[in-house]
C-alpha cells in the first residue's frame, strides 16, 4: 500500500536543524559511522539508525538531547513512566505547544465549530507531570488567545470536582467539550445524567475503544451524532498529539467495524485500530515491520524515533479509492491528509484509563512469596469490557503443576499485583480510580491450552475482543 515507508516529503529541514543544533544526535550518528553530509535523499534518510529510549535517551545526558544542548531553553517538563516505572523526561517549549495546538484546532475548531460557538473545555485528563492534562490546558488556552471563544476549566480526573463545576458553568455556554481518557469519560457521563440538557462534545485519548463504546457514551451523554461530535487523539508524552480522528476517519472506522473482511484487507487483521489523520509536515511517519516510527521537532527533536506502536500508514487518495470501490458512502471527504492506524503498544503492554500497564510490573508481584510458591510466573494481561462497557484489568495466572486454585489464592494474587502496580507505575497510581485498581484474577492450571499452551512462545497480553469484532 502507499505509505509502506512514509507519506509526504522526507523531513530534510528537520534533519539538518537537528544535526546542527543537537549535540546528542551528532554523537549518535558518529557512533553509527554516518556522515550527515551524505544524507541528501529520502533513501539516505531511511538508512539512518532508528532511535528509541534505550539507544538514545538513556545513552546521552538530557541537556545534550535538547536544542542547543540547553535544557533551560525549554520551559515545561512532561514525564512518562517507563516499563520499570523509571521516569522518562520530555522537555518542551511554547513553540512545541503551538505545533500541537494546531491538532486541537482541527478537532475543536474545524470539527466542533468552537471558532463560532462559545465553548467550555473541561480538561479531565490527570494534572501533574503527566503529559495529558497540562498539555491540553496549554493548547486550549493558545486557541483562546488566538481568538476562539473557548473557556477552559481543568478539574483533572477528579470526578467530584467535575460534577461540582459543570452545573455552575455549563448553562452559560453554547457547547461543552469533555476531554479525557475513554473509561473515565464514561464514568463522568454515568455520574452526571444532567449532561443531556447541554450540547456535549467529547475528545478521547490514550487507548483504543470500540465503536459500541462510542455509541453507548454518546447515547448516555445525549450526543446526537457520534461521528461529528466525538474525536480521539493519537498522542504520546514523547511528542504531544501526532494525529486526530476526523469525521472521515470515524466514518471509515465504523464502516469496517461491521465488516471484518474489510478490516482484514485494510489493516491486515480483524482487530479494530484507532484511525486518525496526520500532517506529514508536522510529524513524518514511517511504517517499519508493522510498527511505527516518526520524526518531529520537540524540546527533544526526534529523528526516526521508533515508538513501537503497532500500526501502519495509508495515503489519502488510496483510502478514498478503497472506500469507493467497496461501496462506502463518503458524506465528507475531510482534510486531504494521510491516515495512520494504531493498534497500541507492542511489547505486551495493555492500557487502562490511559495508563500503560507493563508485564514487568506484574512479574514483580508473582516473584514474591507466598504467591511465588504456587504460580509459575506466567500470566496474560487483558482489559476487556463488562456488560456495561466499563473496562477493567484482568490477569490470568498460571498455577504451578499440581496446585489447585481457590478464591483465597486469587485474592492474594490480586492484592500483590495492585500493590506492585501502585509502587512501580505512577501512571497507574494516578490515572486509574482507586475503585478500579484491584485486578480481576483468574487462576488456570499449568499448561492450560487456552492461555498457557505447552511448547508455544508465551505472550503476556492479548487483544481485547472489542478491538476486533467479537461484539460486532
Image: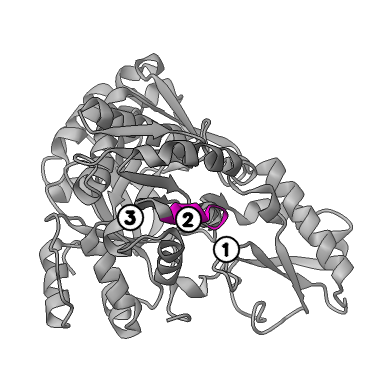
Q: Is residue 217 left or right of residue 339?
A: right
Please give the count of numbered marks on the rendered protein.
3
Q: Which of 248 and 323 is in front in this view?
A: 248
- Magenta span: 190-196
**Residue 297 x, y percent position in the rendering:** 27, 34
Q: How crowded is mark 2: few (under 14 residues within 10 Å), some or many (20 or more)?
A: many
Q: Mark 2 points at which residue?
A: 182
Report which quarter residue 248 is drawn in.
Answer: bottom left
The first of marks 1 and 3 along the sequence is 3
The first of marks 3 and 2 along the sequence is 2
Element marked by disc 1:
loop
Q: Name the residue under label 1.
A: 391
Element marked by disc 2:
helix
**Residue 9 x, y percent position in the rendering:** 11, 47
State the predominant SS element of the stretch in magenta: helix
Q: Can residue 25 be seen in this view?
A: no
Q: Do callouts 3 and 2 mark residues in contact (Cβ within 8 Å)?
A: no
Name the residue at 30% across, 77% down: 256
195 inside magenta stretch: yes
Name the residue at 17% across, 83% down: 326
The answer for how far apart the CA atoms under marks 3 and 2 are is 11 Å
Q: Is residue 147 left or right of residue 466?
A: left
The first of marks 1 and 2 along the sequence is 2
Q: Mark 3 points at which residue?
A: 231
Element marked by disc 3:
strand
In this rendering, is residue 362 above or below 314? above
User: On residue 310, which mark appears?
Assistant: none
Q: Residues within 10 Å of mark 1 (few under 14, many from 20)?
A: many
**Residue 453 x, y percent position in the rendering:** 65, 81
Q: Do callouts 1 and 2 mark residues in contact (Cβ within 8 Å)?
A: yes
**Residue 381 x, y percent position in the rendering:** 62, 65
Amino acid at each position: 500500500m502507499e505509505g509502506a515507508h512514509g507519506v509526504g516529503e522526507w523531513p530534510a529541514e528537520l534533519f539538518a536543524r537537528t544535526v546542527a543544533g543537537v549535540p546528542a544526535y551528532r554523537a549518535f550518528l558518529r557512533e553509527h559511522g554516518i556522515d550527515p553530509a551524505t544524507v541528501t535523499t529520502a533513501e539516505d534518510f531511511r538508512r539512518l539508525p532508528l532511535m528509541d529510549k534505550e539507544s538514545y535517551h538513556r545513552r546521552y545526558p538530557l541537556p545534550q538531547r535538547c536544542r542547543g544542548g540547553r535544557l533551560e531553553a525549554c520551559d515545561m517538563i512532561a514525564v512518562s513512566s517507563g516499563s520499570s516505572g523509571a521516569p522518562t523526561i520530555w522537555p518542551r517549549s511554547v513553540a512545541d505547544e503551538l505545533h500541537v495546538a494546531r491538532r486541537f484546532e482541527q478537532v475543536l475548531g474545524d470539527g466542533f465549530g468552537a471558532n463560532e460557538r462559545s465553548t467550555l473545555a473541561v480538561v479531565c485528563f490527570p494534572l501533574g507531570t503527566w503529559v495529558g492534562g497540562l498539555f491540553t490546558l496549554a493548547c486550549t488556552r493558545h486557541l483562546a488567545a488566538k481568538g476562539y471563544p473557548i473557556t477552559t476549566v481543568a478539574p483533572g480526573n477528579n470526578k467530584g470536582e467535575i460534577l461540582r463545576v459543570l452545573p455552575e458553568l455549563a448553562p452559560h455556554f453554547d457547547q461543552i467539550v469533555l476531554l479525557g481518557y475513554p473509561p473515565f469519560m464514561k464514568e463522568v457521563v454515568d455520574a452526571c445524567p444532567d449532561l443531556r440538557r447541554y450540547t456535549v462534545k467529547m475528545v478521547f485519548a490514550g487507548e483504543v475503544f470500540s465503536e459500541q463504546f462510542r455509541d453507548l457514551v454518546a447515547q448516555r451523554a445525549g450526543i446526537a451524532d457520534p461521528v461529528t461530535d466525538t474525536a480521539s487523539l493519537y498522542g504520546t508524552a514523547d511528542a504531544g498529539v501526532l494525529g486526530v480522528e476526523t469525521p472521515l476517519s470515524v466514518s471509515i472506522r465504523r464502516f469496517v467495524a461491521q465488516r471484518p473482511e474489510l478490516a482484514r484487507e485494510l489493516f491486515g487483521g480483524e482487530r479494530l485500530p484507532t484511525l486518525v489523520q496526520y500532517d506529514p509536515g508536522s510529524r513524518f511517519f514511517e511504517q517499519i515491520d508493522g510498527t511505527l516510527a516518526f520524526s518531529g521537532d520537540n524540546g527533544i527533536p526526534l529523528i526516526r524515533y521508533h515508538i513501537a506502536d503497532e500500526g501502519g500508514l495509508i495515503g489519502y487518495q488510496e483510502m478514498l479509492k478503497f472506500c469507493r470501490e467497496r461501496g462506502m458512502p463518503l458524506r465528507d471527504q475531510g482534510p486531504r491528509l494521510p491516515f495512520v492506524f494504531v493498534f497500541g503498544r507492542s511489547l505486551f503492554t495493555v492500557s487502562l484509563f490511559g495508563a500503560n500497564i507493563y508485564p514487568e510490573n506484574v512479574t514483580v508481584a508473582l516473584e514474591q512469596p507466598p504467591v511465588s510458591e504456587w504460580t509459575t510466573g506466567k500470566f496474560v494481561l487483558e482489559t476487556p469490557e463488562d456488560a456495561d462497557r466499563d473496562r477493567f484489568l484482568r490477569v490470568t495466572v498460571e498455577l504451578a503443576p499440581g496446585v489447585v486454585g481457590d478464591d483465597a489464592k486469587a485474592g492474594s494474587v490480586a492484592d500483590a499485583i495492585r500493590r506492585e502496580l501502585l509502587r512501580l507505575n505512577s501512571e497507574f497510581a494516578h490515572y486509574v480510580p482507586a475503585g478500579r485498581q484491584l485486578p480481576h484474577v483468574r487462576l488456570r492450571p499449568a499448561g492450560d491450552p487456552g492461555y498457557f499452551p505447552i511448547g508455544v512462545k508465551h505472550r503476556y497480553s492479548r487483544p481485547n475482543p472489542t478491538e476486533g469484532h467479537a461484539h460486532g
